[in-house]
Image: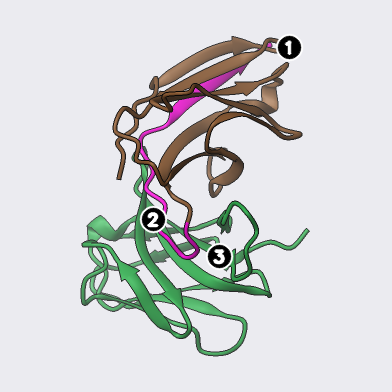
């Protein structure tokens, strides 16, 4: 499984765009990049998944360069409720497979 | 929107006692999981379950742990003789059997287990 590296913490202000970058130098050909969000005292929640280029949904965008050795989760116009831990996971997309979480990035959004 | 539910939300038990943590996965899901998170640490995989048997388990999931799907809706995690180091938040998760594109896992709110 590819090892991921993310910043331990980030600070932002309401209304700003936040970009969280994840490094995964050893990503394999069959690996996908998935991001989960975890609020305090809650279970993780799926945000977005991608393989290459750009993926966008109603919550976030995921940018993946051509070499796929890193990825950037972009949260547009964050609010206080976006304060959470964000996890980057890299692995094959297979049904029933375990998720391997790292330490994640603790995002703190200030007013 | 369907969701995974877990009971109880908080369980306090004495060392050496047995505990059963209960989960109701999303109704049409076929894959079930237990994870745990010790306070201040990362989420750790314990076990996955499919077709009434364990698919994969981690090193943490030793003989003190067991899982069961006693009926068509519940999924339980039993710890036979709890230790102090079992104190953690335990999350149940489930994922769909059909191809959804992302194979995302849906997590419950967790059960906080405190072993004294």
Q: Which mark is residue B36?
A: 2
Residue visible at 29% across and 33% down in the picture: A26
| Percent coordinates x, y for residue A108 in the rendering | 55, 19
Query: Which residues fall within the magenta stretch?
Result: A94-111
Letter of the green chain: B
Residue A21 position within the rendered picture, expressed as x and y whole percent measured from the top left: 47, 20
Q: Is residue A65 above or below residue A45?
A: above
For mark 2, give the secondary structure. strand
Task: Give the CA separation, mark 1 to mark 3.
Answer: 34 Å
* Residue B19 screen position, x and y as percent: 38, 75
Give the prevailing secondary structure in the magenta stretch: loop
Q: Is residue A96 magenta?
A: yes
Residue pictured at 50% horizontal, 70% vertical: B32
Task: Return the residue at label 3.
Answer: B94
Mark 1 residue element: loop
Which residue in the protein does label 1 denote?
A15
Mark 3: which secondary structure? strand
Mark 2 and mark 3 lie on one chain; the one further toward the N terminus is 2
| In-front residue for pair A4/B4 | A4
Closest to the camera, between mark 1 and mark 2, is: 1
Callout 1: chain: A
How many marks are shown on the rendered structure?
3
**Color used for chain A?**
brown
Q: CA distance from mark 2 to mark 3?
A: 14 Å
């Amino acid at each position: 499984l590819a090892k991921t590296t993310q910043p331990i913490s980030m600070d932002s202000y309401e209304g700003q765009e936040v970009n969280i970058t994840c490094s995964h130098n050893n990503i394999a050909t069959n690996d996908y990049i998935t991001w989960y969000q975890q609020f305090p005292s809650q279970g993780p929640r799926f945000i977005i998944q991608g393989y290459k280029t750009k993926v966008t949904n109603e919550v976030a965008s995921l940018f993946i360069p051509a070499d796929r050795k890193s990825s950037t989760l972009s949260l547009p116009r964050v609010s206080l409720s976006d304060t959470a831990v964000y996890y980057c996971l890299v692995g094959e997309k297979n049904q029933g497979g375990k998720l391997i979480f790292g330490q994640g990035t603790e995002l703190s959004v200030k007013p | 929107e369907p969701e995974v539910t877990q009971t109880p939300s908080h369980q306090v038990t004495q060392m050496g006692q047995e505990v059963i943590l209960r989960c109701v996965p999303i109704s049409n899901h076929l894959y079930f999981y237990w994870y745990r998170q010790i306070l201040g640490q990362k989420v750790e995989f314990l076990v996955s379950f499919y077709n009434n048997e364990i698919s994969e388990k981690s090193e943490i999931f030793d003989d003190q742990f067991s899982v069961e799907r006693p009926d068509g809706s519940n999924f339980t995690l039993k710890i036979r003789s709890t230790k102090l180091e079992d104190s953690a938040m335990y999350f149940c998760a489930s994922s769909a059997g059909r191809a959804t594109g992302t194979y995302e896992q849906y997590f419950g709110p967790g059960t906080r287990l405190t072993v004294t």
